[in-house]
């Protein structure tokens, strides 16, 4: 087994979300709440505008861990607390294919070596420097994972 140390960075990425991503996620999840697609409705209920689905944010963030682990089955547990909204601006302009409404920054570090086969991976997920997920943690089975993987 590879050697892991608390605080060791495992990877980082940026996740770009667009209004089109929200529409696709709504269709896949069945969550058609208008706060995720209608600016007028979202602002009428006190939001800054359309916001990303919490589960979309959570799922997109853990992709970094899945890629690092090499297999989604290596993730034994994943949980978080939602601490901030992810407003997704409508900046499609004249070229919707290049639109980016929000960019999340995700950093994965070793939070704890649980035992010989498992580590806890802590995710820091921010939008414009502000946390949107708190205590985002995944338990990952690292047995059989080489240091080069």
Image (cartoon, rainbow, N blue to C red):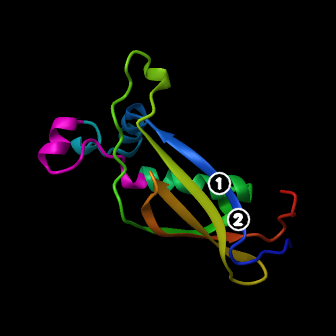
Pointers 2 and 1 in contact (C-beta within 8 Å): yes
* Local secondary structure at mark 1: strand
* Local secondary structure at mark 2: strand
Expressed as whole percent of the image width and height from the top left, the position of residue 51 reads: 31, 46
Q: Locate residue 82 relative to residue 113 in the image: left or right.
A: left
Q: For the point 63% across and 54% down, which residue is it?
A: 64
Q: Nearer the viewer, residue 130 or 12?
A: 130
Expressed as whole percent of the image width and height from the top left, the position of residue 67 reads: 69, 52
Q: Locate residue 35 relative to residue 127 in the image: left or right.
A: left
Residue 141 against residue 43 in the figure, above or below:
below
Q: For the point 25% across and 42% down, which residue is it?
A: 49
Q: Residue furthest top?
A: 94
Residue that numbered label 2 is attached to: 9
Q: For the point 84% across and 75% down, which residue is it?
A: 3
Q: Nearer the viewer, residue 123 or 78?
A: 123
Q: Residues within 10 Å of mark 2 (few under 14, many from 20)?
A: some
Q: Quadrant of residue 119?
A: bottom right
Q: Nearer the viewer, residue 125 or 24?
A: 125
Expressed as whole percent of the image width and height from the top left, the position of residue 148 reads: 87, 58
Q: Which residues are magenta?
A: 38-55
Q: Residues within 10 Å of mark 1 (few under 14, many from 20)?
A: some
Q: Give the spatial CA distance, label 2 vs label 1.
A: 8 Å
Q: Check residue 12 in the rendering and tell me which mark sits there, or answer none.
A: 1
> What is the quadrant of the C terminus in the image?
bottom right
Expressed as whole percent of the image width and height from the top left, the position of residue 125 reads: 50, 59
Q: Nearer the viewer, residue 74 or 93?
A: 93
């Amino acid at each position: 087994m590879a050697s892991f140390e608390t605080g060791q960075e495992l990877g980082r990425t940026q996740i770009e979300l667009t209004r089109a991503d929200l529409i696709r996620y709504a269709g896949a999840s069945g969550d058609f709440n208008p706060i995720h697609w209608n600016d007028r409705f979202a602002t009428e209920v006190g939001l800054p505008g359309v916001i990303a689905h919490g589960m979309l944010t959570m799922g997109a963030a853990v992709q970094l861990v899945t890629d690092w682990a090499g297999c989604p089955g290596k993730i034994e547990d994943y949980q978080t607390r939602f601490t901030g909204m992810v407003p997704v601006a409508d900046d499609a302009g004249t070229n919707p294919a290049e639109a980016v409404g929000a960019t999340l920054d995700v950093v994965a570090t070793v939070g704890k070596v649980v035992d010989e086969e498992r580590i806890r991976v802590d995710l820091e997920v921010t939008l414009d420097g502000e946390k949107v997920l708190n205590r985002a943690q995944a338990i990952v089975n690292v047995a059989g994972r080489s240091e080069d993987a």
